[in-house]
Image (tube, rainbow, N blue to C red):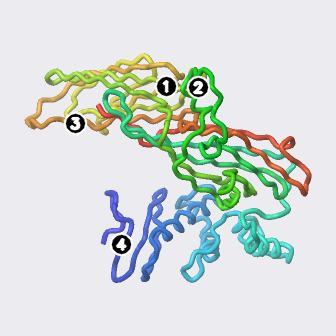
Amino acid sequence: NVIHSRKPIRAAIHNIANTSYFHLNKNNVWLMACTRQNANAALVFEFLYKFISVVQAYFGVFSEQSLRGNFALVYELLDEILDFGYPQSTDPDVLKLMIQTHEGGSLVKTKEDQGKITSQVTGQIGWRREGIKYRKHEMFLDVLESVNVLMSPSGQVLTSHVSGSVRMKCYLSGMPECKFGINDKVVAQQPPAAGPKDTKSKKAAREPIAIDDLTFHQCVKLSKFDVDRSISFIPPDGEFELMKYRTTQDVLIPFRVTPMVQEQGNRIDITIAVKAEFDSRVSAMKVNVIIPTPHNASKVSLFTEKGKAKYNAGDNNILWKVKNLTGGKTCQLNAEIELLATVDKKKRVRPPISINFEVPIACSGLQVKYLRMMETKLGYDDSAVLKWVRYISRSGLYEIRY
């Protein structure tokens, strides 16, 4: 029963002497939970990941150094979030009320603080405490998406889906109530106005999208969402994830990669053309194209007018880096590969080309229609709040067969 080795371990659960060991690795630190009962495996792993998020909320990073340097605090956190083997509250905001990191210890000293903790843990709104005050009211909203695409050599999209999340940072006083609207097909009551459709990005921005899966933060009032599909919530203080979603229809393909391969004896000529399919006013950042090469490659010559290309003999691939690529533009890479003669007559297997990127658009077509808030007790509303909305799409598993 090997728990740690240089090679990756496929099994995340080991059974030894009627005891189940659940383990995972994060930043070269192994976390393990053990039980002799028939426990829910998903619940155990969810608790381990929640513990990682709690440590990150306290120390900024989950690492061996942060755990060693704060061992007493970590022990106290475990004692608070786990009681007789049953997970308790893992909300960092609630834990920070009970376990503080400043000098003077982690014990609560005044009865007023004890009352605040009791009301927050046992109250209806356990994710936000009362009495929060800010001089400047701000709301930051990030729409983060991971684009997963598989293309054929001819450029036809075989499979595509987008996994996204909406993350927020709220610095608001009191107990504000916020409303958030997106262009979901179920939400849209009227069809989009008829008119010319110039670009794919404008079309995706106007038309409602079909969302397959939705998962909300506990602060969202699901009763209102089921009735009128409005996302109403009282936000936690600071940073949190409001919702996660997944869509498989009408996915905007940000890059079209066209590979051309010619094999002549012991020589292979490869031409890779990458075209940005989004609006010309948008530029993609950190575009990296990885082209696998044969194991018996002896010499590789690379030619490109944009970016830098390098052959990695140890990884058997060509790494092509482009710092930024404007929408509508096309860049090209030419590679000449000389092969060593081999006895093996088997046909070479071509792993797919992969591409990594970051582009400031929503490839699912999701658009924030409105973000409103109101605080009746303190008497401020939308006009006193600065709002910032940002869209970022990154590559997930973006591969092209060739």
Spatial CA distance of label 1 from label 4 is 47 Å
Badge 4 density bin: few <14, some 14–19, many ≥20, Cα 10 Å: some
Label 2 vs label 1: CA separation?
A: 10 Å
Q: Earlier in the sequence, mark 3 or mark 2?
A: 2
Q: CA distance from mark 4 to mark 3?
A: 36 Å
Residue 47: name its quadrant: bottom right
Mark 2, residue position: 282
Counting residues from the start of the chain, the first of labels 4 and 2 encountered is 4
Instruction: Using the numbered discs, state the Cα–Cα distance from disc 4 to disc 2 in whole angstroms.
Output: 49 Å
Label 4's element? Answer: strand
Asked whether 105 or 134 is in front, the reply is: 134
Circles 4 and 3: CB distance less than 8 Å?
A: no
> Label 4 sits on what residue type?
His
Q: Which residue is mark 4?
A: 14
Q: Earlier in the sequence, mark 1 or mark 3?
A: 1
- Of the residues under marks 4 and 3, which one precedes in the sequence? 4
Amino acid under label 1? Glu
Whole-percent x and y of residue 280?
Answer: 57, 21
Residue at 79% x, 73% y: name it: 119
- The residue that mark 3 highlights is 295
Q: Determine whether 316 is above or below 104 in the image.
A: above
Pointers 4 and 2 in contact (C-beta within 8 Å): no
Q: Secondary structure at mark 1?
A: loop
Residue drawn at x 36%, y 25% is: 258
